[in-house]
């Protein structure tokens, strides 16, 4: 792949795709400070879609997509050591990007140990971090987010402390957490670990972070990185329109309707939220607000979580045509009448109840 720059536009070329011109610019995107010198774009690109297998030709197409987002100022990418080849793809891309002298990228990853197999030791934590460094072609990881599958298995705090030690050694710049509830984050903070972020599910359908996590993070200068902000697409114009059709008449989708694991996961959240009828009402309200602001239904959903606290949304990498749509989230505010209209629907919601990632751990 060849990369070249021009004064006002940049074009990414490969032998098969031809020119791919970016129509939006980085100047409208302002960096957000996380901690310890790490500044990210205000919208983070989620890379779980890169978990599948990819041939070389597909890699070049993915590279174009990554480059388009970065050129638009969305320079932060979220991955994990369990996302298949995702770290390796991002590593090769960021090496090319770095060599071209462009604005630096930020790549944040996760450490997801198989605690059911063995409790990690400091040496295995060190080895896992070094493996991610090798995959990502980075001398130091910007942010490593610890996920712990089962709180009944001991060792969570010790592993967080091991990551903090690696920060002191310069292998890790920031320590974060993933899907941790308030008691778990509190234990790690009380142990002396400086926690920069906690990545959790947060959306209009899943407001569990408001049950203590947002307040805790405000008090401890911890950023919330929010995935699922549009419910896998269930809070979008597509479903706002589809929800009006007769084939949405039952509470059970066909396999065609829920054609991805992501949609199946978020449909469980809809059921906890209050079911299909309340979800349909919420979509109608969001669509009306979107028309008022000349944005999309998804924009309204993402804007709502941004206005709840120290929150950075993670939006999955999609077609490059959606980049301008994503950036529109940064260009408007929900006013009091918008928030009241949304709250009227939310006041009739039954859940999900409890703390972060609670009912998912029971499944």
Image (tube, helix red, strand yellow):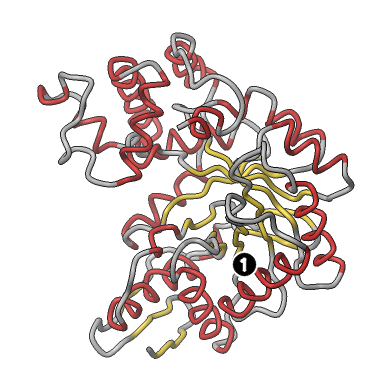
Residue at the spot x=41%, y=38% of the render?
A: 230
Residue at the spot x=49%, y=10% of the render?
A: 347
Q: Position of residue 283 (x, y in %)?
A: 32, 25
Taking 2 as reference, is 155 above or below it?
Answer: above
> Dot 1 surroundings within 10 Å: few (below 14), some, or many (20 or more)?
many
Q: Position of residue 219 (x, y in %)?
A: 81, 33
Q: Residue furthest left?
A: 246
Closer to the camera, 352 or 98?
352
Tag count in the figure?
A: 1
Q: Secondary structure at mark 1?
A: strand
Closer to the camera, 217 or 244?
217
* 333 relative to 213 in the view: left or right: left
Quarter placement of the C terminus: top left
Residue at the spot x=27%, y=90% of the render?
A: 15
Closer to the camera, 242 or 154?
154
Taking 104 as reference, is 157 above or below it?
Answer: above
Residue at the spot x=68%, y=75% of the render?
A: 130
Q: Position of residue 151 (x, y in %)?
A: 66, 38
Residue located beneath label 1 in the image: 106
Taking 28 as reference, is 188 above or below it?
Answer: above
Q: Position of residue 292 (x, y in %)?
A: 37, 28
Q: Residue furthest front?
A: 117
Taking 281 as reference, is 146 above or below it?
Answer: below
* 49 relative to 118 in the view: left or right: left
Quarter placement of the N terminus: bottom left
């Amino acid at each position: 792949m060849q990369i070249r720059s021009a004064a006002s536009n940049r074009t990414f070329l490969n032998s098969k795709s031809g020119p791919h011109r970016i129509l939006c610019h980085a100047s409208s995107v302002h960096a957000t400070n996380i901690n310890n010198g790490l500044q990210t774009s205000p919208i983070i690109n989620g890379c779980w879609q890169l978990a599948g297998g990819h041939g070389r030709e597909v890699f070049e197409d993915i590279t174009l997509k990554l480059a388009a987002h970065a050129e638009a100022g969305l320079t932060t990418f979220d991955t994990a050591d369990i996302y298949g080849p995702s770290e390796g793809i991002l590593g090769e891309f960021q090496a090319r990007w770095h060599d071209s002298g462009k604005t630096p990228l930020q790549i944040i990853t996760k450490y997801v140990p198989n605690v059911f197999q063995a409790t990690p030791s400091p040496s295995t934590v060190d080895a896992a971090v070094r493996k991610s460094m090798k995959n990502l072609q980075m001398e130091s990881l910007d942010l490593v987010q610890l996920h712990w599958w089962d709180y009944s298995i001991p060792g969570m705090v010790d592993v967080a402390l091991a990551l903090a030690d690696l920060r002191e050694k310069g292998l890790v710049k920031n320590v974060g957490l993933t899907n941790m509830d308030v008691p778990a984050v509190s234990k790690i903070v009380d142990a002396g670990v400086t926690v920069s972020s906690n990545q959790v599910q947060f959306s209009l359908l899943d407001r569990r972070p408001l049950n203590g996590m947002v307040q805790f993070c405000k008090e401890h200068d911890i950023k919330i990185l929010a995935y699922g902000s549009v419910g896998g697409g269930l809070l979008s114009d597509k479903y706002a329109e589809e929800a009006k059709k007769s084939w949405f008449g039952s509470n059970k989708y066909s396999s065609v309707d829920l054609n991805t694991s992501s949609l199946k996961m978020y449909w469980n959240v809809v059921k906890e939220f209050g079911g299909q009828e309340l979800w349909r009402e919420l979509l109608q309200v969001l669509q009306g607000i979107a028309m008022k602001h000349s944005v999309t239904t998804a924009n309204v959903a993402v804007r709502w979580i941004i206005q709840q606290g120290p929150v950075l949304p993670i939006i999955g990498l999609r077609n490059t045509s959606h980049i301008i749509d994503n950036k529109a989230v940064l260009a408007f505010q929900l006013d009091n009448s918008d928030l009241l209209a949304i709250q009227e629907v939310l006041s009739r919601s039954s859940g999900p109840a409890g703390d972060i990632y609670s009912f998912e751990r029971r499944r």
